[in-house]
Amino acid sequence: MDFDFTIRDMNLTRIVFVLTLDRKKMTERIVIAETGDAILRLEQNAGDVIYDQTRPLGELLTGFEADPDRRWNANAARLHESYGKVFPFERARWKAVKPCADFLREKYESGEPSAMFAAMRTWEAYLNCYHMGHGPERFLERTLPLYKPFSRSLGLWQERPASALSDAARPADSQVELWYPARKRPFECVAAYASFQPLIYYYLHRIEEWRFAFQECKACGRIFLAKSRHREICGEGCRKAQAVESKRKFDERAKGDMLERVHETAYYYWYNRLRKLKRQKEPDEEKIAAVAAAFEVFRAEAVKRKAEVKQGESKLADFSAWLIEQQDEIDRLTLL
Ligand SMILES: [Zn+2]
């Protein structure tokens, strides 16, 4: 079924937002449809529905419509104002509210179920309240509660159900319609109509009860729902990326260690040769001076070459080969 944002009456009965959570499979399923169709879909996989998707658990809360600028409220205010105007023709009325309908259609087409549902409910309320007594007031009563979680400052996953519930302004904000498992529907569902708040609390409460936790993925930074606080990677893709990165770091470190080791070994080779010369019973001062001078040259050159390896300008193997060549040099000098 497709929703039509025109002033043509669609004759819809109550459209509901139905949620069912699967703890084992770690999934959420959302169905948006008229009540009867939603039940048909859940029980017999039939029914004409507007939305039916199964997603990873927690996605509704992390991807929930966000509206920090309160554009939804501004849009409702414009629709509210239009009630007071006298339109001689339907065409003039349509022209006046078309930007509002366009805003709602754009939200509907975003594919985010919370935005889709609020867009449909808003338009449905606009059409239904038009010919009612106290229509403008009723319209706002029906729509503003839906937008409440859109303009929150924190992410929904950061809310604690208990503290959020104590702020529930009206009884309706803490009540949820629960559909018990029945007939061919073995799972529990909750349905929202007037407000998302109770459905959000229900969701947060279940997550708390199951001791799952929202985490920020260490690899990609995405917020995801984890089976425990110890899981810090969101999925297989990120796990692989993380493993590649760890191996790269490990190799880099190992290479660095190896570089220090070959340099140190060569240095002490020279140092010990020189010390041996100095400790002889009759030290050969001339030879000592020659070796000490060569040692100075070697030290300076080795530091330079080591830095080049570190910066990736030359290879560790070449540095290593050069150090061995230098050992031959000191051997030659000490044997002279
Ligand atoms: Zn990730």
Image (cartoon, rainbow, N blue to C red):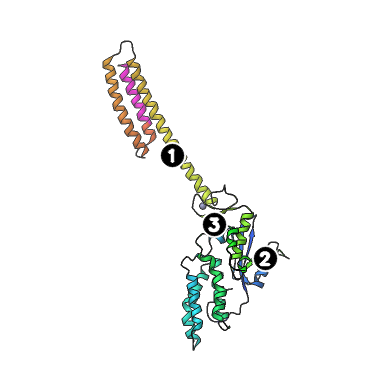
Q: Nearer the viewer, residue 319 or 154?
A: 154
Q: Secondary structure at mark 3?
A: helix
Specify the quadrant that holds the N terminus. bottom right
Q: Secondary structure at mark 2?
A: strand
Q: Position of residue 254 (x, y in %)?
A: 45, 36
Indicate which disc, 2 or 3, sits on the residue closer to the N terminus. 3
Q: Which residue is mark 3?
A: 158
Residue pictured at 56% horizontal, 74% vertical: 141
Residue pictured at 63% horizontal, 74% vertical: 14
Q: In the image, what residue type sits under mark 3?
A: Gln
Q: Is residue 287 above or below residue 81?
A: above
- Does the magenta-highlighted stretch encompass residue 323? yes
Q: Position of residue 238 (x, y in %)?
A: 51, 50
Indicate which disc, 2 or 1, sits on the residue closer to the N terminus. 2
Quadrant in the rendering for residue 61: bottom right
Q: Is residue 56 visible?
A: no
Magenta stretch in the rendered image:
320-336
Q: Is residue 63 above or below residue 219?
A: below
Q: Is residue 269 visible?
A: yes
Specify the quadrant that holds the C terminus. top left
